[in-house]
Structures are given as structure tokens and as C-alpha cells.
Amino acid sequence: MTDMTTSPEGGGEPQVSTRKAVRRGGGDPATRGRTTIADGVVEKIAGMAARDSFGVHAMGGGFSRTLGAMRERVPGGSKSVTRGVKAEVGEVQTALDLEIVVDYGVSISDVAGAVRENVIAAVERMTGLEVVEVNIAVGDVHLPEEEEEEPEPRIQ
């Protein structure tokens, strides 16, 4: 917006003053409104990040893995990336509980540390939430001779 006025001394030369247009609503448009993130969203992010960690064989306890395997075999069923992950999401912070199965021969403390680093980095980067804690429960160790065999499909 441009405003033309004359000099106060009466010199006759017009002075130009510019005023910025006032933005209605105040503040940066990106900060107007509220964003909420569901627990399930954080659980999916954490589950994917945990599975990408070296030494993690599977997620979840024995019973939940069994149910998950059955669900995957049902036509239309899909693999649950949230298995073994529980999140409590607040407005600016989140806390996570993970249950993992580690591969035999790896250092459990190293695996737990790597999982924490991956999960915290992924959740904080993608959501902007502060991860206050990642509790890890190691429910089992996967032995090499325990290779999970796919059952032969039954033809009826």
C-alpha cells in the first residue's frame, strides 16, 4: 500500500511511505490450527523402524506372532507392522513399548540400543513429537535351527 503525503516543511515534494499489508489471522499460516497424531500412526512408524534394526528377528510375543501368522494366511489379510508395539501419544510427547525377538548370537544390549536409536529418529523426524522413552522387552531368541517352515497348502 502506498501513501502519498507532502513534506511537513511545506517543500512541496511529495514523500512516499510504504506500509505493509496487514495479514489477517496473525502469524504463520503453517501454525494456524492443530495437528493430532493417532497412536496407531506412531506405532506403525516405530514398528517399521524397529524391524529395520540389525538383530531383530520379529516383533511381538509368541501368542501375538501366532495370531499374526494366522491372519496373514487369510485371503485379504496383511502383515501387521504394529505387532509388538504400543504407543502413548500426547500433544507434544510420546512413549513407546516394544516387544522383540532377537537373533541368536547378537548382543541383546546392542540390538536394544540400535532399536531405540532407529525408533526415536524415525518417530521424531516424521511426527515432530518428542520421544521420552522407548521400553524394550526381549520376549524370545530366534535359534538358527528354528527356521519357520511354511506349511504345505492343503488341496481339497
Image (spheres, helix red, strand yellow):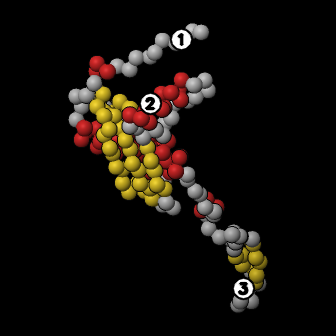
Q: CA distance from mark 3 to mark 2?
A: 85 Å
From the top left corner, tell me how far across and down residue 17 is, in percent: 70, 76
Q: Which of the numbered marks, if any, corresponds to residue 7?
A: 3
Snapshot quadrant of residue 106: top left
Mark 3 falls on what kind of element?
loop
Residue drawn at x 31%, y 21% is 146
- Seen in the picture, residue 118 relative to 18 is either above or below; the reply is above
From the top left corner, tell me how far across and down residue 148 is, in percent: 38, 20
Can I make out residue 116 in this image?
A: yes
The residue that label 2 is drawn on is 66
Q: Residues within 10 Å of mark 1 (few under 14, many from 20)?
A: few
From the top left corner, tell me how far across and down residue 3 is, in percent: 76, 76
Q: CA distance from mark 2 to mark 1?
A: 19 Å
* Relative side of 26 to 62, left or right: right
- Seen in the picture, residue 15 relative to 8 is either above or below; the reply is above
Q: Amino acid at mark 2?
A: Thr
* Residue in front for this viewpoint, 72 or 131: 72
- Seen in the picture, residue 147 relative to 45 is either above or below; the reply is above
Q: Amino acid at mark 3?
A: Ser
The residue that label 1 is drawn on is 154
Residue drawn at x 36%, y 54% is 133
Q: Residues within 10 Å of mark 3 (few under 14, many from 20)?
A: few
Q: Where is the N terminus found, in terms of image quarters?
A: bottom right
Mark 2 falls on what kind of element?
helix
Outermost residue, front direction? 156
Does the residue at mark 3 contact the one at mark 2 (Cβ under 8 Å)? no
